[in-house]
């Protein structure tokens, strides 16, 4: 299986290089409702996921399904406008495949973004949160199976996944620009059903500040390869049981419209620091 996966990764990376994606420095993985950030890259090359070998075509609401490459903030940047969720792929290999390809392209920094439900009762819906750590409750891991030694160690340490120095710089500059940025722990569940109130109480008790259905596979792959990682979560709604109303995916996408300006500023800072 490893030889087949390695071959697929290299084939996809070769396709991107042949179509103008040269020496990218940063990849930005854009979460639900946050895809409009990609429009900030001017003179960009846009490649539909359907054209890239072995890329899935995730159909979650608020995801474009395009790779956008160009220069922004003085850096060569890839935006992955849309991601593949585990609940869509039913495979961690497929879910993490785009991140594997970014590693093969020798991207140095991953900026991973998502929308999540707010679990920490001292935070509020509408805030942005920089991730300091994560809890993986998905029941799976993209490194299960034979290790691809060319990309990283069999047993990668996860202690310093989210670079402390970069987080501190991001928090400081956000405060300087008057942006309400908090810090906390992201919890991944498999989805696609939203969590129950009992599950949210459990996540709160084990130290989770927010909960979502993505991002951890990408972070594990990037950390495995020794890449810099900055992860930013948009706390789009209060998690199940906090408010006396049901949750919906449409609510998450709609809420993201109100945070676009601050979100863009935070990602710009994450590129520069």
Image (spheres, rainbow, N blue to C red):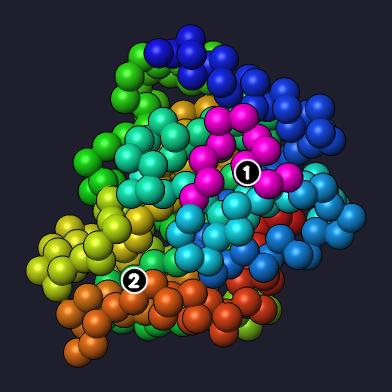
Q: Which residue is at the front of the view, 56 or 95?
A: 56
Query: Cα distance, mark 2 to mark 1?
Result: 27 Å
Quadrant hosting residue 119: bottom left
Residue under pointer 2: 117
Disc 2 or 1, which lies upstream in sequence?
1
Query: Where's the N terminus, which quadrant?
Result: top left
Callout 1 crowding tier (Cα within 10 Å): few <14, some 14–19, many ≥20: many
**Image check: 201 left or right of 169?**
left
Mark 2, mark 1: which one is toward the viewer? 1
Circles 2 and 1: CB distance less than 8 Å?
A: no
**Image check: 25 left or right of 118?**
right
Where does residue 79 sit, x and y in percent of width and height? 68, 51
- Name the residue furthest front: 50
Where does residue 223 sit, x and y in percent of width and height? 48, 35
**Residue 56 counted in the magenta span:** yes
Quadrant hosting residue 93: top left
Image height check: is 148 above or below 225? above
- Would residue 29 be visible to someone looking at this image? yes
């Amino acid at each position: 299986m490893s030889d087949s996966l390695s071959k697929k990764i290299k084939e996809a990376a070769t396709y991107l290089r042949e179509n103008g994606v040269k020496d990218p420095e940063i990849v930005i993985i854009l979460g639900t409702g946050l895809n409009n950030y990609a429009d900030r890259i001017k003179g960009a090359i846009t490649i539909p996921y359907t054209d890239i070998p072995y890329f899935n075509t995730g159909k979650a609401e608020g995801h474009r399904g395009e790779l956008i490459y160009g220069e922004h903030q003085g850096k060569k940047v890839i935006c992955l406008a849309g991601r593949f969720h585990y609940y869509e792929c039913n495979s961690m290999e497929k879910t993490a495949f785009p991140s594997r390809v970014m590693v093969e392209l020798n991207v140095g920094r991953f900026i991973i973004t998502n929308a999540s439900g707010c679990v920490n009762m001292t935070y509020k819906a509408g805030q942005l949160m920089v991730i300091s750590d994560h809890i993986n409750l998905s029941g799976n891991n993209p490194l299960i199976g034979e290790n691809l030694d060319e990309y990283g160690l069999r047993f990668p340490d996860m202690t310093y996944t989210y670079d402390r120095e970069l987080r501190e710089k991001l928090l400081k500059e956000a405060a300087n620009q008057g942006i309400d940025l908090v810090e906390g722990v992201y919890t991944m569940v498999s989805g696609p059903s939203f969590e129950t109130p009992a599950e949210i109480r459990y996540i709160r008790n084990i130290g989770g500040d927010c909960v979502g259905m993505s991002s951890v596979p990408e972070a594990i792959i990037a950390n495995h390869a020794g890449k810099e990682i900055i992860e930013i979560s948009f706390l789009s709604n209060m998690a199940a049981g906090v408010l006396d109303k049901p949750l919906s995916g449409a609510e998450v996408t709609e809420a993201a419209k109100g945070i676009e300006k601050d979100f863009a500023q935070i990602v710009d800072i994450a590129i520069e620091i």
